[in-house]
Image (cartoon, grey):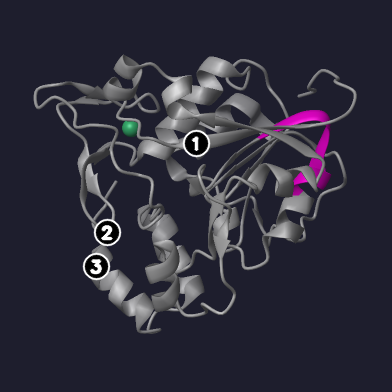
């Protein structure tokens, strides 16, 4: 696998409007890059120089991970599967704190990350559905603001770093809630600032302006502490979980996890067993 995308040159093309949004996403999904851009991704303290790091997704062990992102953050990307911190956080959360890895379920995965998609598909078989706006690799190419699934179709929804890319996020959140069955659960990850309300400004409407304001040319906001309220409008009862509370210091060091957050959401209603 190659991670050779020149992010700085790529970004200049995006900002100059020489690369369209669709082309940018198609290239990004091929290369799994330019996907974070969140302001709170500073590494959680430097890893010891000789400290061995490990990718929980592919099992790769290394002295250090590769640098990643526009600012070339050191020691971030697994050279084997391409995972960065938020992928490893999601994986470890699902493996350690849910029954995702042991119980086949009907899973909707939005914008499936290539480092995890194959494994999830193995685990859940035909129950697994990946959707994406632009990726030909997804099962269904669709806009999540209008999902082609019936109400309550899924036991589990995974949506990591998708909602901030959507200009009007409420219809998308509503759709995620709609296709989840009562008693089902979802994990939502976004650029998240726990100390402030969501920062968004519809007058900022160029890739360059969004890069300056939100840290990424195609992000429309940085979410804040009102996100649980937005999710609750869609029937999702959300709990904000910080990585520093989910994982001990040694786990954060070993797998190179950063200060980050995920939202575990539950849809109210009768719990019933997942069917395969
Ligand atoms: Zn890996």
Mark number displayed over residue 134: none
Q: Residue at x 28, y 21 (%)?
A: 254
The 10 Å Cα crowd at callout 3, few under 14, some 14 to 19, many 20 or more, is few
Q: Report if the CB atoms under discs 2 and 3 are less than 8 Å apart.
A: yes
Q: Which stretch did the figure color magenta? A: 176-186
Answer with the quadrant where ligand 1 appears in the image: top left
Q: Which residue corresponds to mark 1?
A: 261
- Tell whether position 184 is magenta: yes
Q: Residue at x 54, y 35 (%)?
A: 262
Q: Which residue corresponds to mark 2?
A: 70
Q: Report if the CB atoms under discs 2 and 1 are less than 8 Å apart.
A: no
Counting from the top left corner in percent of width and height, residue 227 is at: 64, 47
* 257 or 52, nearer to the observer: 257
Does the residue tagged 2 have its C-beta within 8 Å of any atom of ligand 1? no
Image position of 115 (left or right of 161): left
Q: Which residue corresponds to mark 3?
A: 8
Task: Kindly report which numbered mark, 2 or 1, lies closer to the viewer in this rendering.
Answer: 1
**From where the camera sits, is residue 33 visible?**
yes
Looking at the image, tell me whether mark 1 or mark 3 is earlier in sequence order.
3
- Residue 174 to residue 108: above or below: below
Classify mark 2: helix, strand or loop: loop
Q: Residue at x 59, y 75 (%)?
A: 202
* 144 or 241, nearer to the observer: 241
Looking at the image, tell me whether mark 2 or mark 3 is earlier in sequence order.
3
Classify mark 1: helix, strand or loop: strand
**From where the camera sits, is residue 136 visible?**
no
Image position of 213 (left or right of 137): left
Cα distance in 3D space between marks 2 and 1: 21 Å
Classify mark 3: helix, strand or loop: helix
């Amino acid at each position: 696998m190659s991670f050779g995308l020149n992010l700085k040159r790529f970004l200049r093309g995006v900002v100059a409007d020489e690369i369209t949004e669709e082309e940018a996403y198609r290239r990004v999904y091929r290369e799994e890059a330019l996907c974070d851009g969140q302001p709170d991704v500073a590494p959680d303290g430097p890893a010891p120089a000789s400290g061995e790091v490990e990718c929980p997704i592919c099992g790769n062990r290394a002295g250090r991970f590769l640098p990643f992102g526009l600012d070339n953050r050191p020691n971030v990307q697994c050279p084997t599967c391409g995972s960065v911190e938020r992928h490893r956080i999601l994986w470890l959360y699902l493996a350690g704190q849910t029954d995702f890895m042991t119980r086949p379920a009907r899973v909707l995965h939005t914008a499936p990350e290539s480092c995890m998609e194959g494994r999830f598909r193995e685990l859940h078989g035909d129950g697994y559905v990946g959707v994406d706006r632009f990726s030909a690799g997804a099962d269904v190419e669709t806009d999540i603001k209008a999902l082609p699934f019936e109400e309550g179709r899924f036991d589990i929804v995974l949506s990591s770093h998708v909602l901030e890319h959507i200009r009007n996020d409420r219809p998308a959140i509503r759709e995620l809630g709609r296709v989840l069955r009562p008693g089902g659960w979802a994990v939502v990850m976004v650029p998240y600032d726990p100390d402030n309300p969501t920062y968004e400004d519809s007058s900022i409407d160029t890739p360059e302006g969004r890069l300056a304001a939100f840290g990424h040319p195609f992000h429309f906001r940085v979410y804040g502490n009102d996100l649980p309220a937005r999710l609750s409008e869609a029937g999702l009862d959300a709990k904000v979980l910080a990585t520093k509370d989910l994982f001990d210091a040694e786990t954060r060091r070993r797998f190179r996890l950063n200060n980050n957050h995920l939202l575990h959401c539950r849809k109210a209603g009768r719990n019933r067993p997942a069917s395969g």
